[in-house]
Structure formats: structure tokens, C-alpha cells
Image: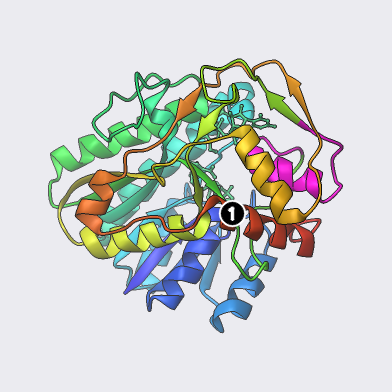
């Protein structure tokens, strides 16, 4: 089976390519390298003894997509390519809607032309906004998003829903990721954010390795057990396996398939700091700061539907997430540079 992986050089895409190769699936990558390094291809090769076919280019380039589909016999597409920084999306909404929404439309159009109608889309728990309760099931209302990034994910979900209703022979899978963290256990692949990390885990990792002084903990007055925000952190290797389960389970079944990819467990900011301290063997200095605008108190997934339908369940613990992140960060203090 051959799968086109858009954004396959990025954090989640690269780990998914490795797991696909291990599972006997052939990934073909398209990526414009706007948030990834070419070195990723060498790391995939070193881990798998396979270098995926790589097209350097943009998913909004329909001519390139037509060429990819004519040169490769693609069975399914996993669409990771997009921009993902919430703060940047507020400053650059046009760039975010163009990349994330328009990019998905161009891709779907090229797929239809090529007769490839199996698509897995990288969505986010952000589409649920501030949920009325936890755990969050797939039937919770979506759309009350608070920033252009979140709205772009919601819009693509709605576009793909409409596409499925108009053309019910498609298999469209919306995977709503909770908080992906961790790295390949070898320490040779991981998250390599450019500039100051926005997300908790890469920030903690950069403090632990000495690139930054301390972590700012955004609020300790939430209605949570220790007052800090609670999230559903999921190991990127589990997330990668979730894509393979989706392709194999429903990738050739016409339908609109929607799944949460999380662990079903919530951890607080201080839980993650403590787990990281244990993993790296020294303190991770932090300061309590005001809440970050737009943050919610707690967010974790119900995983009942994905377990029942796809037989997939995240198995890696918070200890493994922090240990693998530390292994990657300490072996590659400056990322892929
Ligand atoms: P990433 O930035 O590491 O990977 C995205 C990849 O897409 C990068 O390699 C980038 O160069 C490429 N890309 C971006 N725009 C492109 C375009 N127009 N054409 C071709 N390539 C393009 O991000 P990630 O963390 O691996 O996230 C992958 C997907 O999952 C994104 O769609 C993201 O919104 C979604 N997601 C991520 C998270 C998270 O916390 N990481 C959570 C929920 C959803
Ligand atoms: C963020 C995005 C969300 C996106 C998700 C995955 C926001 C508001 N939301 O979610 O849209 O889908 O990433 O990419 O940006 N924290 C600190 N200090 C830090 C960083 C984070 O205390 O330096 C706290 C946050 O307040 C939160 C938790 O850590 O309680 C997790 O934050 P983060 O990793 O940014 O993820 P989310 O906010 O859940």
C-alpha cells in the first residue's frame, strides 16, 4: 500500500512515516520544508533502511500534486501539511487560512482528479473549544474555536463533511489529536520547534537542556487538582500508530469517520514538570505566571469510539513521553541543526 503523506517531514509526519515503513506501508512525502529540515529524511533512512520518495513542494501547487498522483500509484493520503502556531495565526490569519484551508481544498481536488478518495486529515481537539465537561466524546459540539488556527481546522472539517455528503464514495477520516509529545525512542527524531516554543513539552525540554532559564507556568488558579491546566498528552509514536490503524481500519470504507486520538488521561502542567524532572535527573526551574489568554482549564479525550472501531489504544505512559523527549533533546540540543 502506498500512502501520500503531506507534511511528512514535520514532527508527527516523520514519526508516522517511520511507523508506516515498519508496518509495510510505503510513504511518499510532499513537504515544502517551511517548518522542517531535510535532515529528517536521513534520520528516517537510518531508522528504517528506507528513504521515502520525497517531493519538495507545496500542497497548494496543483500542478505538482497532479504530477505526484500520475507518477505514484497512491492508495490513500494522510494530510499533515499546515501551519500550527496559535499566536502566529492571530497575527497572520490570511496565511493560515490560505495554507490550511486552501491547501486542503487543492489537495482534495487533485485527489478527485486522480481517483484517490481515501483521506485522513490532521484535526485537533481545539475544534471542541472550551468543552462543557470532560472526557470529550466525538459527538461534542465543535466550532467554538478562539483563534484562526483553530477555525482553520474546523473549516476544513466542515469542507470535508460537505464533500462526503456530495460524494459518498469517499473515505474521509478526521483525527482530532489531543496534545502530541514525545519522540522516537532512538533519540534520533523528535520535535524541533523554530524560535521560542509555544507548547509546554518542548519548552520544558529546552529549559532542561539549558537553552532557556525557566518555564513560565500559565496560571495555578484553575479548578483542577493542583490549579494548573490539565491536558491529554499523547506519545507521538502512539499517534503515528493511530494513523496506521485508521488507514487499515476505515481507509477503504466509504464514510465520514471521526476519532479522538488521545490517551483518555489528564495530566497537569506540574505533573509534566515532575515527570520531566525524574526523566532528566535534575530540577526544571519554573515560575508561576498569569493565565495565558485563550487557555482552558482541562481537556481530555474519551477514547471509547476509537478503541471500539479501530482497536487502537495509546499504550505509552507519561514517563515514556518525558524520557523519550529528554533522550531526543539531550542528544540533539539544537534539534536537527
Ligand atoms: P509540523 O509543523 O512539524 O509539520 C507540518 C509539516 O508540513 C512541516 O514539515 C511543514 O514544512 C509542512 N508544510 C506546511 N505547510 C505546507 C504546505 N503548504 N505544503 C507542503 N508542506 C507544508 O507540525 P506537526 O506538529 O507535525 O503537525 C502536523 C499536523 O497536525 C498539522 O496539520 C497540525 O495542525 C496538526 N496538529 C498538530 C498538533 C500538535 O500539537 N503538534 C495538534 C493537533 C493537530
Ligand atoms: C495548544 C493550542 C491548541 C493546539 C495545541 C496543540 C493554544 C491556546 N492552544 O494547546 O490550539 O491544538 O496546542 O498544538 O495555544 N503551558 C505553560 N507554559 C508554557 C506552555 C504551556 O504553563 O510555556 C500550559 C498551558 O497553559 C496548558 C498546558 O501547558 O495548560 C499545555 O499547553 P500547550 O502545550 O501550549 O497546549 P494547549 O494549550 O493544550
Residue 134 drawn at (x, y percent): 36, 28
Quadrant of the drawing holding the C terminus: bottom right
Quadrant of the drawing holding the N terminus: bottom left
Above or below, 92 against 233 in this view is above
**Span highlighted in magenta in the image:** 196-215
Queried whether the magenta region covers residue 96, the answer comes back as no
Mark 1, secondary structure of its residue: helix
Queried whether the magenta region covers residue 197, the answer comes back as yes
Above or below, 286 against 26 in this view is above
Q: 223 or 107, which is in the foreground?
A: 223
Q: Identify the residue at horizontal 47%, vertical 37% (top origin).
A: 266
Q: Which residue is mark 1?
A: 319
Q: 105 or 158, which is in the foreground?
A: 158
Above or below, 276 against 285 in this view is below
Quarter of the rendering containing residue 94:
top right
Above or below, 37 against 80 in this view is below
Amino acid at each position: 500500500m502506498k500512502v501520500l503523506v503531506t507534511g511528512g517531514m514535520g514532527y508527527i509526519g516523520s514519526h508516522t512515516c517511520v511507523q508506516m515503513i515498519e508496518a509495510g506501508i510505503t510513504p511518499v512525502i510532499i513537504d515544502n520544508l517551511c517548518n522542517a529540515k531535510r535532515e529528517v529524511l536521513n534520520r528516517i533512512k537510518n531508522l528504517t533502511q528506507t528513504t521515502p520518495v520525497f517531493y519538495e513542494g507545496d500542497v497548494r501547487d496543483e500542478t505538482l500534486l497532479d504530477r505526484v498522483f500520475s507518477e505514484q500509484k497512491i492508495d490513500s493520503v494522510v494530510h499533515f501539511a499546515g501551519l500550527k502556531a496559535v499566536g502566529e495565526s492571530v497575527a497572520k490569519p490570511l496565511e493560515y487560512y490560505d495554507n490550511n484551508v486552501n491547501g486542503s481544498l487543492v489537495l482534495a481536488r487533485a485527489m478527485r482528479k486522480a481517483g484517490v478518495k481515501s483521506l485522513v486529515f490532521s484535526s485537533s481537539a481545539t475544534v471542541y473549544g472550551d468543552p462543557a465537561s470532560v472526557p470529550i466524546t466525538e459527538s461534542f459540539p465543535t466550532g467554538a474555536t478562539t483563534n484562526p488556527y483553530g477555525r482553520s481546522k474546523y473549516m476544513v472539517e466542515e469542507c470535508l463533511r460537505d464533500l462526503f455528503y456530495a460524494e459518498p464514495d469517499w473515505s474521509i477520516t478526521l483525527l482530532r489529536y489531543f496534545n502530541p509529545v514525545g519522540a522516537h525512542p532512538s533519540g534520533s527524531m523528535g520535535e524541533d520547534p523554530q524560535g521560542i516554543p509555544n507548547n509546554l513539552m518542548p519548552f520544558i525540554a529546552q529549559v532542561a537542556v539549558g537553552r532557556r532559564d525557566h518555564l513560565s507556568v500559565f496560571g495555578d488558579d484553575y479548578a483542577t487538582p493542583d490549579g494548573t491546566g490539565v491536558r491529554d498528552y499523547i506519545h507521538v509514536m502512539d499517534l503515528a500508530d493511530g494513523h496506521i490503524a485508521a488507514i487499515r481500519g476505515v481507509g477503504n470504507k466509504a464514510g465520514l469517520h471521526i476519532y479522538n486520538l488521545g490517551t483518555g488521561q489528564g495530566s497537569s502542567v506540574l505533573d509534566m514538570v515532575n515527570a520531566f524532572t525524574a526523566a532528566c535527573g535534575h530540577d526544571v526551574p519554573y515560575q508561576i505566571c498569569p493565565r495565558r489568554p485563550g487557555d482552558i482549564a482541562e481537556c481530555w479525550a474519551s477514547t471509547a469510539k476509537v478503541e471500539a472501531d479501530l482497536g487502537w489504544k495509546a499504550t505509552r505512559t507519561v514517563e515514556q513521553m518525558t524520557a523519550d523527549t529528554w533522550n531526543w533533546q539531550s542528544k540533539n540540543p539544537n534539534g536537527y541543526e
